[in-house]
Amino acid sequence: MRLKWFYAGDIDGFFGLFVDNLLQLMLIQVLCTAVCGLPAEFVAGRILPGAALSILLGNLFYAWQAKRLAESHGRPYTTALPYGINTVSLFAHVFLIMGPVYRETQSADLAWKAGLFACVGSAAIELVGAFFGGFLRRNTPRAALLAALAGIAITFISMGFVFQIFASPLLAVIPAFLILFVYSSRVKLPLGLPGGFLAVVLGTGIAWGLRWLGYPLFQPSTAPVALGLHLPQSSVRDLWQFLTQQDGWKYLSVILPMGLFNVVGSLQNLESAEAAGDRFDTRSSLLANGAGTLLAAGLGSPFPTTIYIGHPGWKAMGARWGYSLLNGTVITALCLFGGVGLVMKVVPMEAMIGILLWIGIIITAQAYRDVPRMHFLGVAFGLVPALAAWLLLNIETTLRVTGNSLFDAAAKFTPDSIALAGVFALNQGFILTSMIFAALLVYAAERQWHRAAAWALAGAVLSYFGIIHAYTLTPLGLQVKLGAAAAPEFAVAYVGIALTALLLLWVGKADGGPEGGRRFFDKRSSHGERSSRFEGPNTGRPTPEPHRQDPRPADSSGPRGQRNPERDAGEERRRRRKRGRREWNGPRN
């Protein structure tokens, strides 16, 4: 099967991914100048071109990967994995590595080189993780992978933009709801206009129209536009000087968790793509991810790239693989010719952020849609660490705006107001904690107590060495605390959880017991759903329940009171065909 490189839905997908990437580039331009002391000309001439080339490399690979998968498997509606700069790592590198180095040394150049070192470290972890990612993915329940994504989507991706939308109702509400209406209904607009494109045009027209009428609600950016050709430059020599002359290894406490975060986040996004119908090879996807980050560091960008959250959102827009090519090409052109600032002078941010709201909504919805009903409890519990991390971000932002620091204000919080110690503990390594929480409830609902105990012991090990829950509060903010016995109280607690699970394995009965989550959701799920909770053996997921006695009358093909294999196989085929008709693999005609 030979397919085209571009389809109509790629325009919508391009606008969504382009807006997301553009936001990261804007953050780089603002934060590197304000926090790290880097000149705006240096950011536009050294950092953004390197970031653009790494984004282009990843977008080209994932577009080719999706097209090849579509042609080889006969699935023309395959959607490429979205790709760009990791937002969480961006903030971590700026506020926990580059910013502190600049405040300590007053050298912006040294802060930039420290960021490059952190980027190389993150790339190394991603490349090594590519060889173990498949094992982790096979032995992790889908609910555990999707719950963390849903938590990030509804908080870090959506909520901030929801506030911006309703802070500017005349500018942002109409474009945002146009996007939500068009994408949720999948209605076909006149002339085949993409909904995202129409929303951006409408929002821009409203903003400039109100400005012309004397209501300057939209204030164009006042940042200077550095138009001109900015070619990427090698930063290998600068990186080598930093490695030989400076003590960059002390930032491993930030680099290691961020590298693990990128690997686990990519695995979660691959699982999200598979739940939407597109299964991509784990190792090659993670290797491309690490290669893009390594290229970024080699060309002067201190910010890792990664597989983006939001694949189901782009798929629901009708995007395939052309949107990835368009995004990489346009982002690269803007960065190489200094056009990022020019775009922000013409197009208001309020006209574009509705697309990101849609992405957050559909990712959260997918976490429930693509797991068995019995696992809804695990998804709900898995949202908690991300909510805590988002709460901490807002607390820190509020304190910073008022001229205070978290270090000074922490003692003023009491358990009656906010138990800040619990917020700190849940924030540290919240992606991994979210997976552990969700997996524990999934296996509890399935009564797979030995697997629940294994996940609890994994939590004990991660806590003991400081990967999760361990922290140190300093005048510079909340710092990661790595090392032996970093969070011993949490390690002991997780061992207690494991012992509790094993005790239930010993004393529990196969049937009976109180009306818990298992029975509650069993009553509301079909036999086909209960018998296909997981994908098969050797995946780290429970096997289907054995067939119970059939209360229906016997027929001519089998004895009374027993399941008939041939009849069950026919029913299963009919269920699969029905699910296939319900599954949406492209835009409606």
Image (cartoon, rainbow, N blue to C red):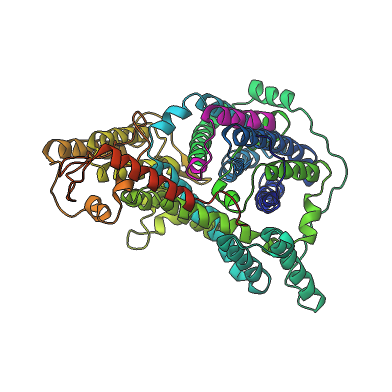
274 in the magenta segment: yes
Q: Is residue 239 rendered to the left or right of residue 265?
A: right
Tell which residue pokes out farthest to the front in this image: 556
| x and y percentages locating residue 393 in the rendered image | 51, 53
Tell which residue pokes out farthest to the bottom in this image: 213
| x and y percentages locating residue 66 in the rendered image | 62, 36
| x and y percentages locating residue 153 in the rendered image | 51, 52
**Which residue is at the front of the view, 102 or 187?**
187
Tell which residue pokes out farthest to the right in this image: 228
| Picture residue at 38% right of the left edge, 31% below the top | 465
Q: Is residue 254 above or below residue 152?
A: above
**Which residue is at the front of the view, 534 or 384?**
534
Majority secondary structure of the magenta segment? helix
**Which residue is at the front of the view, 260 or 407?**
260
Residue 27 seen in render: yes
93 in the magenta segment: no
| Picture residue at 66% right of the left edge, 50% below the top | 13
**Is the N terminus in the top left, top right, bottom left or bottom right quadrant?**
top right
Total marks drawn? Answer: 0
Which range is magenta?
Answer: 272-296
Q: Is residue 508 above or below residue 245?
A: below
For residue 400, which quarter of the picture? bottom right
